[in-house]
Amino acid sequence: MDPRTRTLAALLVTALVLVPPAVAGARPSGPAPVALRAVERVRMIDNAYRPRSISVARGTRIRWINRGSLVHSATSTTGRWDSGLLDPGERFSRVFRRAGTFPYACTIHPAMTGSIVVT
């Protein structure tokens, strides 16, 4: 090994030995990485939402999917959102950013009710 290569190798070994592992693997300071938002599914089957009630964290996207053979909707009973009529196979989604309980129903089948509980 020539003297230049030997010197470079010695510097590299010294750097690896002197730098503590916590510093070597440290992340740069700044805002924490943003976590991927969760997606929860609610299926519409046989005039029912499944699950009928679901608890999620703020920032979760709820995706309603019509898996039945009839037209349904997912419509807030307090006027916050309306999916419109969803044919079989269609879907609708909404992100819940505020904590609270959000009841909803199908506009065609009023006995078909559900709720989203956001913590």
Image (cartoon, rainbow, N blue to C red):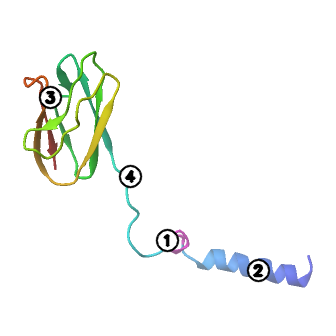
Q: Is residue 87 left or right of residue 46?
A: right
* Residue 39 point in image, percent of width and height: 32, 42
Dot 2 lies on which element? helix
Dot 4 lies on which element? loop
In three-dimensional space, the C-alpha distance between marks 3 and 2, rounded to whole angstroms, equals 73 Å
* Residue 5 point in image, percent of width and height: 86, 79
Whether tag 2 and tag 1 are in contact, CB under 8 A, the answer is no
Whether tag 1 and tag 3 are in contact, CB under 8 A, the answer is no
Name the residue that disc number 2 marks. Answer: 10
- The three-letter code of the residue at mark 1 reads Ala
Whether tag 4 and tag 3 are in contact, CB under 8 A, the answer is no
- The three-letter code of the residue at mark 2 reads Ala
Q: Residue at x 19, y 39 (%)?
A: 82
Name the residue that disc number 4 marks. Answer: 36
Name the residue that disc number 1 marks. Answer: 26
Residue interval drawn in magenta: 21-27
Nearest-to-viewer mark from 1 and 3? 3
